[in-house]
Amino acid sequence: EVLGEDAAGRLAADPWLLLAVPGVRPQQADGFARAVLGPECGPGDVRRSLAVLGWLLAQAEVKGHTALDAPLLHKALAQYGVPDPEAALEEAIGEGTVLVFQEALGEPAAEGGAAEESEKAEEAEEAEERAVRVLVGRETAALAEESLADGLARIVNTCPGPDQDGRGADWEQAVAAAPSRSAGELVRAAAGHGLVVHTGGE
């Protein structure tokens, strides 16, 4: 049902597609692949690497992580027997199976004076390039997050904060009457913003 009406044909061509079915683990997919492919089955099969990578990202999404560090994925792929994790990830990126995002770390390198040697400038540029966190995620999660961000931005831009509606005193009374400090903080946040996201409580 997950793989569609042509599931049998697709699984015959790529038995590791079984990992797309909820509840199936790599060991089970490997056993199925051995039954289908026989001696042609191996841990370095590109089809296996792509399927395990997709499975790892799907498991991370269940836990709330829509993108993972590339080094973390390399380590996880190695734990599941992928012989060359870096090549497997590059293959997935090249195939468009996953998307790559870059997140800057720290402040940009400071610019040097006019008399700074070109060698030092190159070293500073290399250091700045290294200060980037490489994240990998599935396209479905990236599109969902982008859609959510656009929706939240529209709400923020169209809903004025309650403190702008001329009822500030009413909100202060609500804060004072809150049954707990955390409840008061939530009321205060709602008073100051048109959109409030509350997590971690009832």
Image (tube, rainbow, N blue to C red):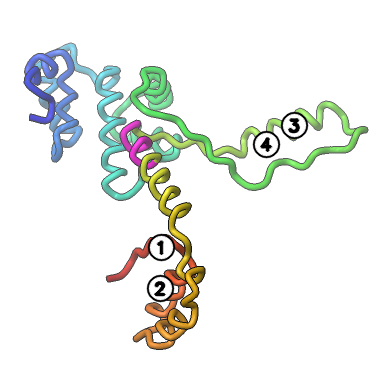
Q: Residue at x 33, y 24 (%)?
A: 97
- Left or right? Give the position of 17 relative to 53: left
Q: Secondary structure at mark 3?
A: helix
- C-beta proximity under 8 Å, tags 2 and 1: yes
Instruction: Tell me if I can see residue 86 in this picture.
Output: yes
Mark 3, residue position: 123
Structural distance between the alpha carbons of marks 3 and 1: 44 Å
For label 1, the crowd category at 10 Å Cα-Cα, with few meaning under 14, some 14 to 19 and many 20 or more, is some
Structural distance between the alpha carbons of marks 4 and 1: 35 Å
Answer whether residue 142 is magenta in the image: yes
Mark 4, residue position: 128
Mark 2, residue position: 186
Residue 111, percent from left and from top:
80, 39
Mark 1, residue position: 196
Which range of residues does the magenta coloring cover?
139-145
- Left or right? Give the position of 122 relative to 154: right
Nearest to the eye among marks 4 and 2: give it: 2
Which mark sits nearer the N-terminus, 4 or 2? 4
Residue 196 vs residue 42, the one in the foreground: 196
